[in-house]
Amino acid sequence: MPDAKGASFLLDSPGPLVDALRRQGWRVIGPKLGQGAIVYEEIESAADLPRGLTDEQEGGHYRLREGDPDRWFDYVVGPQNWKKWLFPARQKLWSAERSKDGFSVESHEDEWPKTAIFGARACEIAAIEVQDRVFDNGDFADSGYTKRRAGMLIVAVQCARSAATCFCASMNTGPRAEAGFDVALTELETGGFLVECGSDAGAAVLDGLELADASAAQQQAGEAVSHKAAAEQTRTMPANVESVLRDNLDHPRWEEVAERCLSCANCTLACPTCFCSDVEEVNDLSGDHAERWRVWDSCFSLDFSYIHGGAVRRSTLSRYRQWMTHKLSSWHDQFGTSGCVGCGRCIAWCPVGIDITEEAGAIAAEPLAQEV
Amino acid sequence: MTKPKLAVWKFSSCDGCQLTLLDCEDELLDIAGAIDIAHFLEATSEIKGGPYDISLVEGSITTPHDRERIQEIRKNSKVLITIGACATAGGIQSLRNFADVEAFTSAVYAHPEYISTLAKSDAIADHVQVDFELRGCPVSKHQLLELITATLAGRIPRVPKVSQCVECKLSGTVCVMVAHGTPCLGPVTQAGCGNLCPSHGRGCYGCFGPKENPNPPALSAHLADLGMAPKQVRDFYRSFNAGAPAFAEESKSHE
């Protein structure tokens, strides 16, 4: 019986684990085939998992392909990410009713059944931890987010391959998740799964499954899977990107990338750490009923920087620079980490394939001379 | 408090945007209760004179008569709001802006001298001051209700000028261009339709016209990479919002 975190076991297929979670009352959200991509939706059994599929990704390009039919997790990250669930695109915050002698306000929080996210990759766990620091920083806590996060269990899948857009190794966020999960699965080359228990909650889920202890050799085989995935990565983020961007706000490369940038906001909305939102008020025709909603926003929209007198970031150059310098540089000042986890979504889901590693690399390769 | 007087006007158009107002079935009685519908020929033959508090204008300016009539409407309207691609960008009929109208009339009509038409199909804002533009072909029922509700409440309507992509991402719609290679005008088009086409696996046709600071040349370069010939790229921008400056200019660079 798995009674301790840190223990490793073997499992033939993910099926019994999904079943055990559901038996124990967890809603399971996992990867599923939808709209020609891998999307994160509720799954009822392992039969819902997109077994046998793999993906091909490049700048502005994503295609699913038939892979080894026996492999369960040979695709990597897709268009969606877990913030879809933890930080929903649209959230009702409160509603108000006008009465004869004034008005009354009723706050609103959506229900959150206890939820297991199944198949989170190392970069995605790192992204959740980045958002944890945004939505609960000690002084301020977003009550909805913290409630959802508390009622959540993470089943990680250690990536067995990397897409061409992946660069987690250079961000030190993957491809192997060392912590931050309750249970982690590594699909071994010889078939079957190495199961790591990461928490007491994970141990409680594994309790009752018939698990064989993993040998030292099998644990090494699990590690080797991650080494292979890391070795496949071709994109890297310059190690000095934080300072190089801060020192090159007037670099001519910003103009060059602004020529290609559509300011469509896809990068920010696909990003698993981008957290900006707007609030909107709606009312009915009578004006007796009003609601406030929180909606995803993006630093690529004009209204995002609207202050008294107008928007301050009118050009695409200023918006792209704001996004990238915040993500890779000033995020450190604000939250103590990078805002980038190297998942590559902003590269793949940019309609014209702008590559954040290439842009950072271009500036790092020819930085402006600094005044002494 | 007296109810604000509303007038709905039609110029060169298909009536689809006015129809959207009648399509607000669940809310129509509330609208009729909140405002005095003084001139709305598609709904009622009862006509009350101006001045009007709110005028909704559908259609584009295509004849000398249109050109005079819109001036009168402007004079009689406190707030003038244009609705739909015809009124805000000249509509599909602005395809004439890229052709010789006299050649058309002499080819089609036995007596072209009876045809009184302008060389171009113009947006209403090309002729008079417009207080608010509601995009779309047709306009979205949701946005039209928001416009009416906000105008009655005295607040600015919430009609974001962001890209269509924002609507797709907020709805969880997978990008049809990235995931399937389907040409899509979404990245240069203003949101508002409820990502109707991409959510059905189709590329965006640009019904809501150019978004704020659009970058069509960057998109066109990618459309060429996806295999579109220059003529196809040109025609992609030339539909319901062909006359919108950002789309018109881009289409001309692929002639």
Image (cartoon, coloured by chain):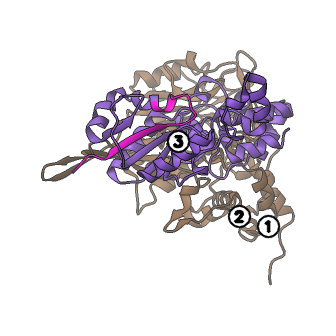
User: Chain B's shade in the image?
Assistant: purple
In this rendering, the answer to whether A259 lies above or below A200 is: below
Q: Position of residue A80 (x, y in %)?
A: 59, 36
Secondary structure at badge 1 equals loop
Q: Are marks 1 and 2 in contact (CB under 8 Å)?
A: no
Left/right of residue A30 with respect to residue A67 in the rendered view: left
> Magenta stretch?
B1-18
Query: Sequence-wise, which precedes: disc 3 or disc 2?
Result: 3
Q: Is residue B31 among the parts visible in the rendering?
A: yes
Q: Is residue B16 magenta?
A: yes
Residue at (61, 44) in percent of width and height? B123
Q: Position of residue B167 (x, y in %)?
A: 55, 38
Secondary structure at badge 2 equals helix
Left/right of residue A339 with respect to residue B237 in the rendered view: left
Using the image, tell me which numbered label, if any, was put on residue A251.
1
Q: Amino acid at mark 3?
A: Lys
Residue at (77, 57) in percent of width and height? A360
Left/right of residue A165 with respect to residue A369 in the rendered view: left
